[in-house]
């Protein structure tokens, strides 16, 4: 019975370690405390869709009232035969012309070269204390035949 309980406890401890989530962290220079790095990352999306030969690239940002977006850059990337991603040369950027905590940035491009593509979206946001973050998100990939 003792052996059974020790095995059971070992399994439970291993499961709790394996199910732990990983988060990026940064040390705050003002107070020395460790905090989450990308505070705004779950309010920023990157999506790529393909229909009728046209790829539609969308980056959406929704921030808290005291946060503002500064800029958004989209890069359409193609996967090479070696498995690495590189720019197709299609890059779009926009800078905020007024304070806003919501924006949908959308662009489209005709795609006629077969391959696997995804959208890389990079946003710069600023909170009320002036702290800026740069966040990168990738869309799911699409395949063009």
Image (cartoon, rainbow, N blue to C red):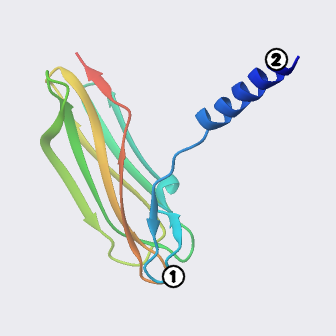
Q: Nearer the viewer, residue 11 or 108?
A: 11
Q: Percent x, y for residue 144?
A: 24, 21
Left or right of 98? Residue 23 is right
Identify the residue at the far right of this view: 1
Q: Percent x, y for residue 127?
A: 47, 76
Q: Earlier in the sequence, mark 2 or mark 1?
A: 2
Q: What residue is shown at x 59% (from left), y 33% (from top)?
A: 18
Q: Residues within 10 Å of mark 2 (few under 14, many from 20)?
A: few
Marks 2/1 in contact by CB < 8 Å: the verdict is no
* Residue 51 visible: no
Left or right of 127? Residue 120 is left
Q: Which residue is mark 1?
A: 31
Identify the residue at the far front of this view: 2
Q: Percent x, y for residue 139?
A: 37, 39
Q: Which residue is mark 2?
A: 4
Q: Secondary structure at mark 2?
A: helix
Position of the C terminus, as image quadrant, is: top left
Q: Secondary structure at mark 1?
A: loop
Q: Residues within 10 Å of mark 1 (few under 14, many from 20)?
A: few
Q: What residue is shown at x 33% (from left), y 29% (from top)?
A: 141
Q: What residue is shown at x 38% (from left), y 78% (from top)?
A: 98
* Residue 26 visible: yes
Which tag is nearer the camera, tag 2 or tag 1?
Answer: 2
Cα gap from disc 2 to disc 1, whole angstroms: 47 Å
Q: Quadrant of residue 119?
A: top left
Left or right of 101? Residue 13 is right
């Amino acid at each position: 019975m003792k052996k059974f309980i020790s095995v059971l406890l070992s399994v439970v401890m291993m499961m709790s370690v394996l199910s732990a989530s990983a988060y990026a962290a940064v040390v705050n220079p003002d107070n020395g405390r460790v905090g989450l790095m990308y505070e705004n990352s779950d309010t920023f999306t990157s999506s790529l869709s393909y229909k009728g030969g046209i790829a539609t690239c969308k980056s959406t940002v929704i921030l808290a009232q005291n946060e503002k977006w500064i800029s958004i850059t989209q890069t359409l990337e193609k996967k090479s035969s070696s498995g690495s991603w590189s720019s197709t040369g299609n890059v779009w950027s926009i800078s905020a012309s007024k304070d806003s905590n919501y924006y949908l940035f959308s662009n489209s491009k005709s795609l006629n070269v077969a391959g696997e593509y995804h959208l890389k979206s990079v946003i710069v946001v600023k909170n009320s204390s002036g702290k800026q973050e740069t966040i990168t998100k990738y869309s799911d990939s699409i395949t063009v035949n």
